[in-house]
Image: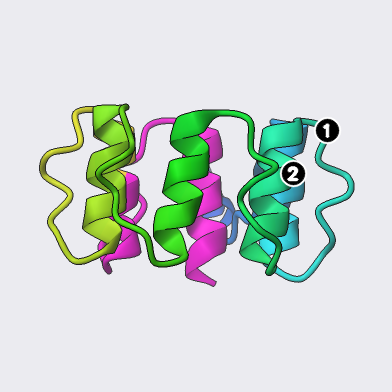
């Protein structure tokens, strides 16, 4: 009986995981900002600039060229100028392609979750928690 209760508690905690369950403080702040908080508590400048761009600012403050191109693609540009193959594949999947060309299994599972699948096959706990928070 105790084992069954422990398993149920484990799954209930997993099912209700949200931004507060993300260990990385910048990723947690980014997750919270996506839910309505400000981006100001994000220490990483590129992630903060990405957050601000998602809230209406331009992508020009993002120093990493691939992340800047990805940001611009989300605003209407093409994905073709993204050099990182997994990020380009994620970008293309967000524009209607499949997730199958993403090599990183956790990123592929995250991509599939964005398209309606569950987050349960994501092994990285922070990414899984981010995925769960996104689904709420």
At 67% from the left and 63% from the top, the residue drawn is 34
Q: Can you identify the residue that label 1 sits on?
A: 43
Image position of 67 (left or right of 73)? right
Counting residues from the N terminus, which is met first, the one under dot 2 or under dot 1? Answer: 1
Q: Nearer the viewer, residue 46 or 110?
A: 46
Q: Is residue 113 above or below residue 43?
A: below
Q: Quadrant of the C terminus?
A: bottom right
Q: Mark 2 near mark 1, Cβ–Cβ under 8 Å?
A: yes
* Total tally of numbered discs in the picture: 2
Left or right: 126 as drawn, with respect to 99: right
Question: How far across and down, in percent of the image, does residue 32 sit?
Answer: 74, 58
Q: Which residue is mark 2?
A: 48
Question: Is residue 38 magenta-colored?
Answer: no
Q: Position of residue 73 (x, y in %)?
A: 39, 56
Highlighted magenta segment, given as a residue range: 110-136
Looking at the image, residue 19 lies above or below residue 47: below
Residue 74 at x, y = what percent? 43, 61
Residue 87 appearing in the image: yes
Taking 135 as reference, is 77 left or right? left
Using the image as rendered, state which of residue 126 and residue 115 is in the foreground: 115
Instruction: Please tell me which residue is depicted at 12% across the width and 39% down the height of the picture.
Output: 101
Towards the viewer: 51 or 68: 68
User: Where is residue 45, by image quadrant?
Assistant: top right
Q: Is residue 48 above or below residue 73?
A: above
Q: Secondary structure at mark 1?
A: loop
């Amino acid at each position: 009986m105790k084992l069954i209760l422990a398993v149920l508690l484990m799954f209930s905690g997993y099912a209700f995981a949200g931004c507060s369950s993300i260990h990385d403080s910048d990723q947690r702040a980014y997750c919270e900002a996506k839910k309505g908080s400000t981006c100001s508590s994000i220490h990483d400048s590129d992630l903060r600039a990405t957050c601000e761009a998602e809230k209406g600012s331009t992508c020009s403050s993002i120093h990493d060229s691939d992340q800047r191109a990805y940001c611009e693609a989300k605003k209407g540009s093409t994905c073709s100028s993204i050099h990182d193959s997994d990020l380009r594949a994620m970008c293309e999947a967000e524009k209607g392609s499949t997730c199958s060309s993403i090599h990183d299994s956790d990123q592929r599972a995250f991509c599939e979750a964005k398209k309606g699948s569950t987050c349960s096959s994501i092994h990285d706990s922070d990414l899984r928690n981010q995925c769960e928070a996104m689904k709420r």
